[in-house]
C-alpha cells in the first residue's frame, strides 16, 4: 500500500513539473509576441493601373476554311500539310490548268484568224468603190443633161445602202471583238482562280484534299489559322475613361503560369460598350513573337494610366478596410490610417500617414490587433 502511494505521489510530481514548464513556455511566448511578416515603406515609382481580362484570337482571317474558287483536278497540294507554316503570296494549291490553257490559246488563234480573214475580205471587196464611181458618173451625166435628178437620187441611195451594209458589218465586228475580250478575260480570271495563293501569313490546321482529287468551286480544301494575332482586353465602364492610346501595359497569360508578363501597348479601343457585358474592348500590341500568342488563350492585363516618380510606397496587400495599415513600432502593433495616392495591383502610394523605413504588416492581417506585441522574423 505504501509503495502504491509512493508511485502516485511521484506521478503527481511529474505532472506538476510539466505544467510549470508549459506555463513558463506560454508566458515566454506571450512575452516574445506573435511573429509578424512586415515590409518597409520604400520610395519608388507610384503607378495607377487599370486591369481587365484578356483574350487572344487569330487575325482577321481567324481560323477558317480555305475554299477553292474554281472547279478542277488537284495537280499540286504539297504546301497543304498539317502544322505547316506559310507566308503571304505562297501557292497553297494548284489545279490542272492544261485544258483551260489550250482552250484560251485556241480561242485566241481562232479570233486572230477571223480578223485576218475579215481584212482580206474588205480589201478584195470593191462594192463600195463601184457605188461611189456610179454616183460620180451619174452626177456628171446629170450636169450634161443626160440623167434626171431622180436617176441621180437612186444611184445615191444605192451608195447609202452599201455604206449602211459596211457600217453594220463594222458594228458586228466591234461587238465580236468586245465579246471575245470579255470571254477571254473570264477564262483568264478562271485560270487565276485555279491557283490558290495565300492572302496572309498562317499555318495549315487540317488538310481536306489530296493530289488528283476532283473538286468543285466553293469546296473546302483545308483549314488554316491566320498567323496574325489580335489581343483584346475587356475593361469595366468605371475604368474605361482613363484609357488612352499608347499607354503601357503588362499582359499575363494563364497558359504561361507564373512566367513574367509580356510588355504591351494600347493600340486602339472601341468607344461603345458591349451590350451584353457593358464592358469596353481595348486592343493591345504585345511585344512578343506571335507564335507564343495562342488563339483562344486568356489572361489578365494591367494598363498603366498614370505614374509618379520617387513616392512613398507600400505593398497593396498591407491595406485593409480601404485605408488602414498595421505598423510595427518597438515590438508592438499600431493601427494607423493613411492617405492614398496612386494604387496598382501590387503597390500603393502613401501621401500621408507613413514615412519611408517604417514597417507595415503584410500577411495574416486579420490575426493582429492594435497594441499587440509581435516579433519580426530575422531575415535569413
Image: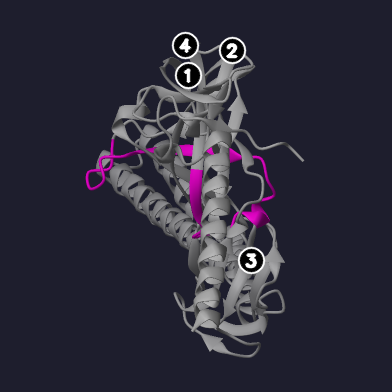
Position of residue 223 measured from the top left corner of the image (x, y, whole percent):
53, 73
Examine the structure image and report whether residue 94 is included in the region drawn in magenta: no
Kindly identify which residue carries mark 1.
Answer: 342
Q: Residue furthest front?
A: 2
Among the 4 quarters of the image, the one containing residue 43: top right
Position of residue 245 measured from the top left corner of the image (x, y, whole percent):
50, 25
Mark 3 or mark 1, whichever is nearer to me: 1
Kindly identify which residue carries mark 3.
Answer: 203
Mark 3 or mark 2, whichever is nearer to me: 2
Magenta-colored span: 273-300
Real-space Cα separation, disc 1 to disc 2, in angstroms: 10 Å
Q: Earlier in the sequence, mark 1 or mark 2?
A: 2
Q: Is residue 75 above or below residue 332?
A: below
Label 3: few (<14), some (14–19) or many (≥20) C-alpha neighbours in 10 Å:
many
Kindly identify which residue carries mark 4.
Answer: 353
Q: Earlier in the sequence, mark 3 or mark 4?
A: 3
Position of residue 220 measured from the top left corner of the image (x, y, whole percent):
49, 77
Which of these two is toward me, 280 or 316?
A: 316
Amino acid at each position: 500500500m505504501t509503495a502504491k502511494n509512493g508511485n502516485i505521489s511521484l506521478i503527481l510530481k511529474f505532472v506538476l513539473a510539466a505544467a510549470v514548464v508549459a506555463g513558463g513556455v506560454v508566458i515566454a511566448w506571450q512575452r516574445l509576441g506573435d511573429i509578424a511578416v512586415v515590409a518597409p515603406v520604400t520610395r519608388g515609382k507610384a503607378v495607377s493601373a487599370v486591369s481587365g481580362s484578356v483574350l487572344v484570337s487569330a487575325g482577321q482571317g481567324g481560323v477558317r476554311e480555305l475554299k477553292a474558287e474554281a472547279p478542277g483536278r488537284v495537280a499540286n497540294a504539297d504546301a497543304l500539310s498539317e502544322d505547316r507554316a506559310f507566308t503571304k503570296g505562297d501557292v497553297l494549291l494548284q489545279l490542272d490548268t492544261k485544258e483551260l490553257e489550250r482552250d484560251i490559246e485556241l480561242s485566241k488563234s481562232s479570233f486572230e484568224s477571223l480578223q485576218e480573214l475579215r481584212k482580206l475580205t474588205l480589201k478584195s471587196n470593191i462594192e463600195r468603190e463601184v457605188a461611189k464611181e456610179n454616183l460620180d458618173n451619174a452626177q456628171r451625166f446629170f450636169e450634161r443633161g443626160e440623167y434626171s435628178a431622180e436617176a441621180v437620187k437612186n444611184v445615191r441611195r444605192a451608195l447609202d445602202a452599201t455604206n449602211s451594209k459596211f457600217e453594220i458589218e463594222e458594228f458586228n465586228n466591234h461587238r465580236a471583238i468586245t465579246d471575245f475580250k470579255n470571254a477571254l478575260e473570264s477564262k483568264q480570271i478562271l485560270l487565276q482562280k485555279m491557283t490558290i495563293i495565300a492572302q496572309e501569313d498562317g499555318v495549315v490546321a487540317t488538310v481536306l484534299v489530296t493530289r488528283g482529287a476532283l473538286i468543285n468551286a466553293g469546296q473546302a480544301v483545308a483549314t488554316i489559322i491566320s498567323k496574325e494575332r489580335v489581343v483584346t482586353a475587356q475593361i469595366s465602364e468605371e475604368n474605361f475613361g482613363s484609357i488612352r492610346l499608347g499607354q503601357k501595359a503588362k499582359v499575363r497569360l494563364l497558359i504561361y503560369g507564373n512566367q513574367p508578363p509580356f510588355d504591351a501597348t494600347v493600340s486602339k479601343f472601341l468607344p461603345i460598350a458591349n451590350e451584353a457585358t457593358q464592358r469596353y474592348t481595348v486592343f493591345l500590341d504585345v511585344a512578343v513573337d506571335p507564335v507564343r500568342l495562342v488563339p483562344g488563350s486568356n489572361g489578365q492585363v494591367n494598363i498603366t494610366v498614370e505614374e509618379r516618380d520617387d513616392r512613398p510606397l507600400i505593398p497593396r496587400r498591407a491595406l485593409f478596410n480601404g485605408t488602414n495599415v498595421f505598423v510595427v513600432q518597438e515590438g508592438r502593433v499600431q493601427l494607423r490610417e493613411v492617405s492614398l495616392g496612386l494604387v496598382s495591383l501590387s503597390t500603393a502610394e502613401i501621401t500621408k500617414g507613413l514615412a519611408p523605413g517604417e514597417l507595415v504588416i503584410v500577411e495574416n492581417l486579420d490575426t493582429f490587433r492594435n497594441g499587440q506585441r509581435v516579433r519580426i522574423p530575422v531575415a535569413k
